[in-house]
């Protein structure tokens, strides 16, 4: 076929892809969003025991009007994984990684369970 559009249509159909997703161009984050992410990272690196609610409170006191769910979403993007005792809310173990691959998660879980056995 001479028409490259048909090739894309056929390829998208064969792969069960939506053709509109092939033309998607991601929008880069704004400088303000990058600044907020860096501030969240700074606070969490300095105080790894605090959670997203506390980080949101600190940032709001610093006049960065940010909602706690926004902080939680950015922390999830940074790849934070924590093993927590739900009863005491004690953080047993944690790691920070961008990939969140299964090996990374399992390693954190094994370390956490080696330190703390659940009571139930």
Image (cartoon, grey):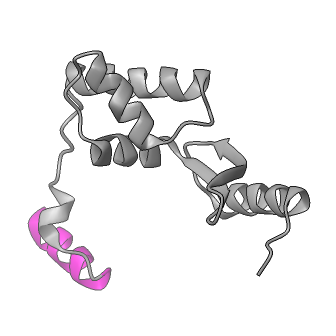
Residue 68 rendering spot, x and y as whole percentages? 31, 43
Which quarter of the image is occupied by the C terminus? bottom right
6 and 104: which is toward the camera:
104
Q: Residue furthest right?
A: 114
Residue 106 rendering spot, x and y as whole percentages? 74, 63
- Quarter holding residue 109: bottom right
User: Residue at image x 25%, y 76%?
Assistant: 17
Relative side of 81 to 55, left or right: right
Mostly what secondary structure, the magenta segment?
A: helix
Q: Is residue 16 above or below residue 50?
A: below
85 and 8: which is toward the camera:
85
Q: Residue furthest top?
A: 62
User: Residue at image x 19%, y 27%?
Assistant: 65
User: Residue at image x 22%, y 17%?
Assistant: 63
Magenta stretch: give its range: 1-15
Which quarter of the image is occupied by the N terminus? bottom left
Does the segment drawn in magenta span residue 104?
no
Residue 3 in view of the camera? no
Residue 118 rendering spot, x and y as whole percentages? 79, 72
100 and 82: which is toward the camera:
82
- The number of numbered badges drawn on the structure is 0
Relative side of 48 to 77, left or right: right
Residue 13 rendering spot, x and y as whole percentages? 22, 83
- Quarter holding residue 37: top left
Q: Residue furthest front?
A: 88
Q: Is residue 54 above or below residue 111?
A: above
Q: Is residue 33 above or below residue 85?
A: above
User: Residue at image x 19%, y 68%?
Assistant: 8
Relative side of 61 to 23, left or right: right
Residue 101 in view of the camera? yes
């Amino acid at each position: 076929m001479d028409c490259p559009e048909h090739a894309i249509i056929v390829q998208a159909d064969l792969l069960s892809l939506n053709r509109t997703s092939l033309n998607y161009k991601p929008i880069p984050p704004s400088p303000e969003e990058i600044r907020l992410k860096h501030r969240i990272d700074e606070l969490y690196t300095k105080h790894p025991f605090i959670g997203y609610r506390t980080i949101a409170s600190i940032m709001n006191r610093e006049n960065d009007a940010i909602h706690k769910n926004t902080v939680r979403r950015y922390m999830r993007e940074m790849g934070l994984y924590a093993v927590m005792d739900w009863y005491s809310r004690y953080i047993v173990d944690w790691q920070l990684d961008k990939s969140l691959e299964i090996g990374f998660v399992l390693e954190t879980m094994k370390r956490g369970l080696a330190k703390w056995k659940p009571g139930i």
